[in-house]
Amino acid sequence: MLDITAAQRRSLRARAHALKPVVSISQKGLTESVMKEIGVCLDSHELIKIRVYSDEREERDKFLSEICEHQGAAPVQHIGKLLVIWRPSPEQPIAKESLRASRRHEPRRTKRSHQG
């Protein structure tokens, strides 16, 4: 399982907000074909949402940990029946700058000339 910092997790959650689920886990559970599809989607998009059609929170937690272990991904968020996971693209190294949360900027200080 890939570890990420709290700031990276916050940034990824913000990016995932507008995403729609690309994979669904139904009553059959986490099958081999579902796991393969998750891998394909992670290769294409890096950050994905998964919808789980189960009412048991413990089962959804188990699915999240199994997926992240098997795929080498990081769990970003588990909210309701949605799981958000992230794995960097295998072609590109992890760009730390792209994961950093935006920092608050202080007002720009300018040099003022003193008269008199």
Image (cartoon, rainbow, N blue to C red):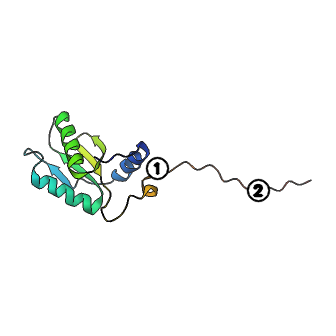
Residue, far left: 28
User: Where does label 2 land, which residue?
Assistant: 111
Q: Where does residue 27 sit, x and y in percent of width and height?
A: 8, 44
Disc assigned to residue 110: none
Q: Position of residue 61 (x, y in %)?
A: 22, 38
Q: Residue at x 32, y 57 (%)?
A: 88
Local crowd size for mark 1, using a 10 Å CA cut-off: few (<14), some (14–19), many (≥20): some
Tell me which numbered mark, 1 or 2, is placed earlier along the sequence: 1
Residue at point 46%, 52% (across, down): 100
The residue that appears at 18% across and 42% down in the rendered structure is 63
- The amino acid pointed to by label 1 is Ala
- The numbered disc on residue 101 is 1
**Does dot 2 land on a helix, a strand or a loop?**
loop
Residue 57, x across and y down, in percent: 20, 35
Q: CA gap, disc 1 to disc 2? A: 29 Å
Report crowding for label 2: few under 14, some 14 to 19, many 20 or more residues within 10 A (C-alpha). Answer: few
Residue drawn at 10 percent across, 52 percent down: 32
Residue 10 quadrant: top left
Residue type marked 2: Lys
